Amino acid sequence: MLLTGLLAGVAGATTVSLLHAVEHLAYHYSYGLLLDGIGASSPVRRALAPAVGGALAGFGWWILRRRSGVPSLSATIAGKKPMQHLPMAADAALQVVAVGSGASLGRETAPRQLAAVLSSYGTTWLGRLTASTMGTLTARDREILLSCAAGAGLGAVYSVPLGGAFFAARVMMGSWHPRVVGTALLTSSLAVAVSRPVTHFERNLVWPNPALSYQFTMLAVAIAPLAVVVGLTFNRLVSLAGPKPQLTSWVLIPGVALAGLVTGICSIYRPELPGNGRSVLVVAVGSNLTLAAAVVILLLKPLLTALYLRLGAVGGLITPALATGAAAGTVATLALNSLAHTNLHVAAVALTCAAGVLAITQRAPAFAALFVWELAHPPVWLLLVFAVAAFSSHGIRLLREQSTARASERPKRLWPSTFR
């Protein structure tokens, strides 16, 4: 467990360092966030940087998929497919190149894969050394450690120890077993501590008064239906976009480059669109969006993500879903403040909707609430608001699925073919 946590921290720090290097090279800046670099770059660089990065990533995926292919991390952890260390690590590096140059995909899949690869190497090596005294790892041990490595890699890259642990336990393993949860908490906390010098970001945000907590809790219930609609739409869009089977031909090169060019052209007008979605969260939490800009981001962010997936790119979907949810919450808040003359806190409502959307896309409300809270570090009382939104959205989805299942089980009414 200690070795898994340490290696996951190394994977997270390596991923973030490489990502920053690609971002700084693509947009020619030396300090600040990706949004700062894009805002200071010329329109030509904004348009071409994602296209060039997409072409390079597409070329790498073409070579990689022609030779070996990359099995899914879930199938590998479950033991359905063997761990292919070098292809999986190479795929993670190509994802970083694509996202760092502006691809509208999440960066969290790359550290999860790299952490699983390093953990597999490390536990295999340590298991051989200690086999005579401690015995060998069982298949269940291996599954738990690799799942926790993936969660710890996610936690390390975003500095969210609880979010990484809950991702491993609920999303990867689907279990609340003390052995699973304990291993996840230990490995994720250690990984975040190891990667902290590289991944640390200052947060300086203004949050609403704690006295308003009960109002925001009621608002979280009210915003849950919107989060369900946005989350299900996002799921449906990315499901339709993903090519089956995965593209392996040379078309990957111009395809991913085209997706980058479209994203780059859009970024000339809305610099928040490139990247994994952090830029959208920054402007949403900073209340720096107009209603028209929020509507544009709400429509274009998931469409650009779907375009990358359709043309053969791979990457995470957690932060694009978060960004879409935050944009939806911003649209709702600005519309209410304008039309109904309310005074709702844009940042709090945006993140509340984002938590609800993430609960739908990941089917894990506890993870969604904790991840959003740790990501933004608002006051502790807002964690309750996020949890209410996440569990309300998840509950609405479950009721909808149960209603659909009951409707499909009803016997169809038979009508006579002729009437006498």
Image (cartoon, grey):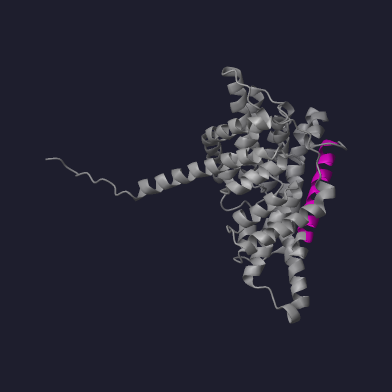
Residue at 80% in and 56% down: 10
The quarter holding residue 391 reads top right
Q: Is residue 356 visible?
A: yes
The percent position of residue 188, horizontal first and vertical second, equals 73, 55
Magenta extent = 6-28
The quarter holding residue 227 reads top right
Residue at 40% in and 45% down: 403
Q: Residue furthest right?
A: 30
Viewer-proximal residue, 406 or 313?
406
Q: Residue furthest front?
A: 211
Q: Is residue 72 visible?
A: no
Residue 5 in the image: above or below residue 320: below
Residue at 58% in and 49% down: 364
Q: Residue furthest bottom?
A: 132
The percent position of residue 362, horizontal first and vertical second, equals 59, 48
Determine if the magenta segment contains residue 8.
yes
Name the magenta segment's main secondary structure: helix
Viewer-proximal residue, 195 or 105?
195
Residue at 79% in and 29% down: 39
Image quadrant containing the C terminus: top left
Determine if the magenta segment contains residue 164.
no
The percent position of residue 382, horizontal first and vertical second, equals 65, 37
The percent position of residue 48, horizontal first and vertical second, equals 77, 35
